[in-house]
Image (tube, rainbow, N blue to C red):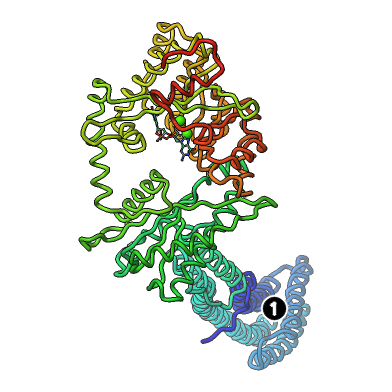
Amino acid sequence: MTLTWPKRIGRRLALGFGALVTLMLLALMQAAVPLKLVGEGAERFATQDMQRLLRVQALSLQIEGVGVSFIRLLNAPRDTRVAEYADVDAQNRRIDGIIDALGNDLADAEQQETLRRLVACRAIYADAFIATVDEIEGNNAEAAARALAEQVNPALKAMLVESNALLSRERQLVEDQLANAQSMLGRIVWIMAGASALVVALAAWLGWRTTRSVVKPLARLETGAKDIAAGNYSHLIDTTGLQEVDRVGAALNTMADTVAERERQISRLAFEDALTGLPNRAALLQPDQTTTAHRNTLALLDLARLKVVNETLGYPTGDSLISALAERTNTVVRGAAADGLISPEPVLARLAGGTFAIWFGTLNRHNTQTLLEQLERAISAPVTCGGQQVDMNLVVGFADLGASGMPQTAETLLRNAEIALHAAKRSAQTHAWYSEAQEAARVGHLGLVTDLRAAVAESQLQMWLQPKFSLSTGEAIGAEALVRWQHPVRGFVSPAEFVPFAEQTGHITLVTQWMLQQAVATLARWAAPYPHLSIAVNVSTRDLQDPGFALRVKDMVSASGINPKRLRLEITESGLMEDTRQSIALLHALNEIGLPLSIDDFGTGYSSLAYLQQMPVTELKIDRSFIDKVDASPGTQRLVQAMVDMGHGLGLMVTAEGVETEAERATITSLGCDVMQGYLGSRPLHGKALQDWLDRLPSSDPPQV
Ligand code: C2E
Ligand code: CA
Ligand code: CA
């Protein structure tokens, strides 16, 4: 049987329960009708049938009573007869009264007939009665007795016969009625039991159907929700025909769509760089990327000076630079792929900050050169951010499978490209290829530094001094001490070759110690003739990690008796950043001794202005990469200007390093720099050259170097 259910749960339940209540009412009604019949029967029985039966019974008794009364009358003395008459009369009247009453409500024709015969007998009895009374009054006792015996008694007997017939018939009727009522009651019990069983069955069926009609859609909803929980968003929940459930289903479908969209976004964010929309490091290093056969050359691009752009011109400017680099590199790479210069199309990804990676299929060195030239051209135009023009400088490190052609993991290639990038930066090149020779050179350099101990002991080291000049007066204000190594076998070794490795192994502290001793000794000699000249010694990260460093410097200074203000210490930004808390404490200790401190190579490291403010430094040395051709680059000028403003804002003296041309000097002067250092002023000097330079200085008493 199919039911057309209402569309709403409320209505559906109301229908189900309404039907149940109706069924129960019907059951009650079908029980009420026979109960009413039984009730009516019982009432009739009590009010009519039973009364009639009693009446008929009373009639028989009266008739018998009259017979007895007559015998008493007959034998009564004359003076008591009146009372006996009255008694017989009263009985006769009662008999008549009962007969009259019965005449109205006898049950059937048979009884009527019997009653009629009774009435006829009554008439005979009346005559007999009068005849007998006459004899009694006539004092004919014998005749009276005869009349009684022959007329009255037979008449009464006949009446009694009829009355008894009536009685037995009435009894029969009453018994029949009782039997009827009993069988009816039995039937009613059966009917009610049957009807109740039917109602219960119907109710159970209805309840089951109602429950199922609600539960089934809910179960579908549950399955749908579980589907969504399992991440199966495409399987939508169908309509169930139940409004409330369908509303929840629709909400779940919407939720599934939203969650699916959000998941897509999350996975996009996980593999996509938010700023440039390029794949990120995770995407680049995905297993399917690394196993792709033709990916065997990795280029690592680094946007130099990003940090200083962020710090001085603001992060939005830095972001614009990154976006511009991403866009231009993308265009160049796609163009090169379209021209067939490189194939298959490479993957460009942004790894972090200003570092990008390009994963090439094949790339021979000639093609690389062409691609690099295209890249350099593409990024040579300054980027305009917020009305300002900013230059981009790019350094690239390449790594490939190498001569061995052995397959390498993406991580290995990335590490090699990083080594190449650092090599390029160290040698101030725009790019470098990773090579095993490079690795060997690295190892060779490391071997070299073990000779440093001997170099210090055997005086292979020299201190060269590069003068610094005030840009406002043009006068020399001091010099920076630069180490030189005259290796007994290798000959001259540039500090760029051994200082980074000496820093890595910790040997640099020997160099610093030696240079400090030389500087202090020189300052002691200069004290009288050039009391205004200072000497700056380069201090490395390793020195800053040595808790005894400040004390050693202090002892050295006080032993020599020099003015501590003449001994400067130059610290690179990156050195400061390594262990900020400890470095700051050490810088304060050095400052307390009275030594002025300089931040070296400013703009190339990763300093944070917040930290810079906490440091007791007095000089900011702008790295020479910013000064190189600064006169021809408005973008760089803006950066230098920002750095100068920042330095002055912090109350620092600002020095420009690596000034080589008049044009550069003019530009940095106009940008507000205080001091210059560079080949234009003087190359680093030693021995006689240094002495000659000192001799030319306005001094009364030329000192010995
Ligand atoms: P730095 O501290 O920035 O030193 C300045 C470098 O720039 C010197 O190179 C100097 O010769 C060079 N220079 C000066 N003027 C010009 C110029 O007009 N044009 C160009 N192209 N270069 C110029 P140098 O002596 O080769 O030193 C290289 C680096 O080695 C130094 O850079 C410094 O970081 C490190 N270094 C040198 N001596 C020492 C030292 O005694 N101790 C420590 N820890 N590091 C040192
Ligand atoms: Ca320096
Ligand atoms: Ca420097």
Image quadrant occupied by the C terminus: top left
Residue 345 in view in this figure: yes
Residue 60 in view in this figure: no
On the picture, is 130 further left or further right than 8?
right
Reply above or below: 424 against 17.
above
Secondary structure type for disc 1: helix
Percent from the top left, x then y, of residue 136? 74, 78
Residue pointed to by mark 1: 141
Q: Which of 504 and 566 is in front in this view?
A: 566
The residue at 77%/82% (across/down) is: 134
The residue at 45%/34% (across/down) is: 574
Percent from the top left, x then y, of residue 678? 51, 34
The residue at 55%/30% (across/down) is: 620
Percent from the top left, x then y, of residue 596? 52, 19
- Where ligand 2 lies, by image quadrant? top left
Amino acid type shown at disc 1: Ala
Q: Nearer the viewer, residue 286 or 139?
A: 286
On the picture, is 100 further left or further right than 288?
right
Reply above or below: 693 against 73.
above
Q: Quadrant of residue 323?
A: bottom right
Q: Nearer the viewer, residue 344 or 390?
A: 390
Answer few, some or many: residues within 10 Å of disc 1's Cα (few below 14, many 20 plus, some between 14 and 19): some
Q: Quadrant of residue 525?
A: top left
